[in-house]
Image (tube, rainbow, N blue to C red):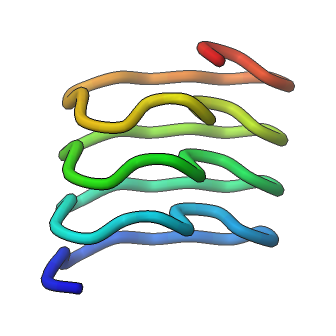
């Protein structure tokens, strides 16, 4: 993994991240599928869960943007 400046809190938050930078994920499974997306913020269980490559997104709430 080469991603940098990421913050993850919660089981499996940012689990698949490989090269994504400056992402913030708070909650179980938040941004779980993000691999290369940058500058994303997800707050809540499974928020942004299906986002894989997108950048500059905000998802707030249970399963928001999934």
User: Would residue 17 appear left or right of 12 to someone viewing this image?
Assistant: left
Q: Is residue 32 above or below residue 9?
A: above
Considering the image in quadrants, where does the N terminus appear?
Answer: bottom left
User: Would residue 51 appear left or right of 21 to someone viewing this image?
Assistant: right
Q: Is residue 1 above or below residue 57?
A: below
Identified at 21% across, 59% down, the residue is 20
User: Would residue 35 appear left or right of 29 to someone viewing this image?
Assistant: left
Report the number of numbered marks: 0
Identified at 64% across, 63% down, the residue is 13
Where residue 3 sits, quadrant-wise, is bottom left
Q: Which residue is more in the foreground, 22 or 17?
A: 17
User: Would residue 15 appear left or right of 51 to someone viewing this image?
Assistant: right
Q: Position of residue 51 (x, y in %)?
A: 44, 30
Identified at 66% across, 23% down, the residue is 60
Q: Position of residue 50 (x, y in %)?
A: 55, 29
Considering the image in quadrants, where does the C terminus appear?
Answer: top right
Identified at 62% across, 35% down, the residue is 49
């Amino acid at each position: 993994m080469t991603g940098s400046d990421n913050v993850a809190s919660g089981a499996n938050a940012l689990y698949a991240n490989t090269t994504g930078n400056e992402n913030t994920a708070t909650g179980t499974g938040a941004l779980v599928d993000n691999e290369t997306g940058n500058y994303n913020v997800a707050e809540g269980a499974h928020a942004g869960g299906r986002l894989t490559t997108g950048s500059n997104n905000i998802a707030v709430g249970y399963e928001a943007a999934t």
